[in-house]
C-alpha cells in the first residue's frame, strides 16, 4: 500500500503536486469542485503536471453543484444524487468531471452519492439506482470505475445499491472516519463487508456523533476512534494493495502538521 494525500484541483496544478512531493509522497487523489475546470484541456494539463512532478493520481473526487449541508437534518435534502431537485444537474457534472479525468488518464472517479435510503422500496432509492446506473454506463464507456465514498449510508445499503445498479465498474472509496462521523458502521468491520469492492481508501480519523443533528468530529489520525493498526491489517487480509490517501479537512499550517504526523504513524503501523 502506497501513501498519498488529498489535494484540490486548481488552475495551476503544479503547485499542488509540489506539495505532494514536499511531503515525501508519490500518490494523491484530486478533489474537483470547480465545474469551469471540468474540461479535457484541464485534464491534459493535470496529467502533464503530475508526470513532471513524478506523482500518480489514484482517483479524481468529483464534486457537484448546488447546496451542501453536512449534517443529519439538511444533508438528506442537499447532498449527492438523492435530492431530486439537483440530481440531473449533478449527473451532468460528475460525467463532465469524468471526461476531464479520462483526459488525465485517471481510472477511478469518486463522489458522495448522498443519504441513500435504507428502504429498498423507497421511490428515492430506486431513482438513485437509475441515476448511478446512468453514470456507471458513461464511465464504463471511458474505461473508468465509479467509486462510492462511504459514510452517508450503511455498508449493507451500499452493497445492495452496487448489486442493484448491476455494472461491473463500481467500487468503494472507503473513508473510515466518515463511517464513524455519520454513525453508520465500525470501519474495521466495514472492510470485511466491502471486501473486493474497495478500490480507494482515505486515511482520516473521527468520532461518533453525540446528537441526532450534527456529524461526529473529525480528529487527527491516531486521536479518533478508528483502530488504524487493525484497519490496515484487515485491508491487507482482503488483498487491498492500493493507495492510502491522507485527508485532513482543515486548512493552514496545522493541516500540514497533522498530515506529517499521519505519515509517520502510517509508516510505523505498516512496518509491523
Image: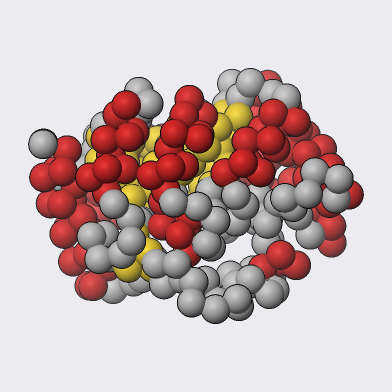
Q: Is residue 109 visible?
A: no
| Residue at image coords 21%, 55% | 262
| Residue at image coords 67%, 61% | 79
The residue most toward the right is 123
The residue lying toward the viewer, choosing from 110 and 74, is 74
Q: Is residue 245 visible?
A: yes
Looking at the rendered image, the quarter that the N terminus falls into is top left
User: Residue 229, how many percent across, how many down?
Assistant: 22, 45
The residue lying toward the viewer, choosing from 120 and 252, is 120
User: Residue 238, how many percent across, how many down?
Assistant: 37, 26
Where residue 237 sits, quadrant-wise, is top left
User: Residue 111, how many percent across, how many down?
Assistant: 58, 48
Say above or below: 75 vs 239. below
Say above or below: 258 vs 16. below
Q: Is residue 58 left or right of residue 123?
A: left
| Residue at image coords 85%, 50% | 122
Looking at the rendered image, the quarter that the C terminus falls into is top left
**Total numbered circles:** 0
User: Residue 105, how many percent across, how many down?
Assistant: 48, 28
The residue lying toward the viewer, choosing from 42 and 142, is 142
Amino acid at each position: 500500500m502506497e501513501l498519498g494525500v488529498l489535494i484540490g484541483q486548481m488552475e495551476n496544478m503544479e503547485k499542488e503536486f509540489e506539495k505532494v512531493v514536499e511531503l515525501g509522497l508519490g500518490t494523491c487523489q484530486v478533489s474537483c469542485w470547480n465545474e469551469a475546470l471540468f474540461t479535457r484541456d484541464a485534464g491534459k494539463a493535470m496529467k502533464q503536471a503530475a508526470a513532471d512532478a513524478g506523482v500518480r493520481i489514484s482517483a479524481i473526487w468529483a464534486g457537484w453543484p448546488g447546496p451542501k449541508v453536512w449534517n443529519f437534518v439538511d444533508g438528506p435534502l442537499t447532498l449527492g444524487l438523492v435530492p431530486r431537485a439537483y440530481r440531473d444537474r449533478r449527473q451532468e457534472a460528475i460525467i463532465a468531471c469524468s471526461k476531464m479525468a479520462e483526459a488525465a488518464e485517471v481510472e477511478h472517479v469518486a463522489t458522495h452519492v448522498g443519504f441513500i435510503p435504507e428502504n429498498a422500496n423507497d421511490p428515492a432509492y430506486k431513482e438513485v439506482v437509475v441515476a448511478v446506473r446512468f453514470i456507471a454506463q458513461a464511465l464504463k464507456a471511458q474505461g473508468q470505475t465509479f467509486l462510492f465514498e462511504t459514510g452517508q449510508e450503511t455498508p449493507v445499503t451500499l452493497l445492495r445499491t452496487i448489486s442493484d445498479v448491476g455494472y461491473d465498474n463500481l467500487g468503494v472509496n472507503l473513508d473510515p472516519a466518515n463511517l464513524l462521523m455519520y454513525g453508520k458502521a465500525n470501519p474495521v468491520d466495514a472492510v470485511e463487508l466491502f471486501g473486493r469492492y474497495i478500490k480507494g481508501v482515505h486515511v482520516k480519523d473521527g468520532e461518533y456523533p453525540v446528537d441526532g443533528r450534527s456529524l461526529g468530529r473529525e480528529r487527527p489520525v491516531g486521536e479518533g476512534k478508528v483502530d488504524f493498526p487493525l484497519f490496515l491489517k484487515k485491508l491487507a487480509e482482503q488483498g487491498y494493495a492500493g493507495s492510502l490517501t491522507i485527508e485532513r479537512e482543515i486548512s493552514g499550517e496545522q493541516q500540514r502538521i497533522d498530515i506529517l504526523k499521519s505519515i509517520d504513524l502510517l509508516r510505523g503501523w505498516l512496518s509491523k
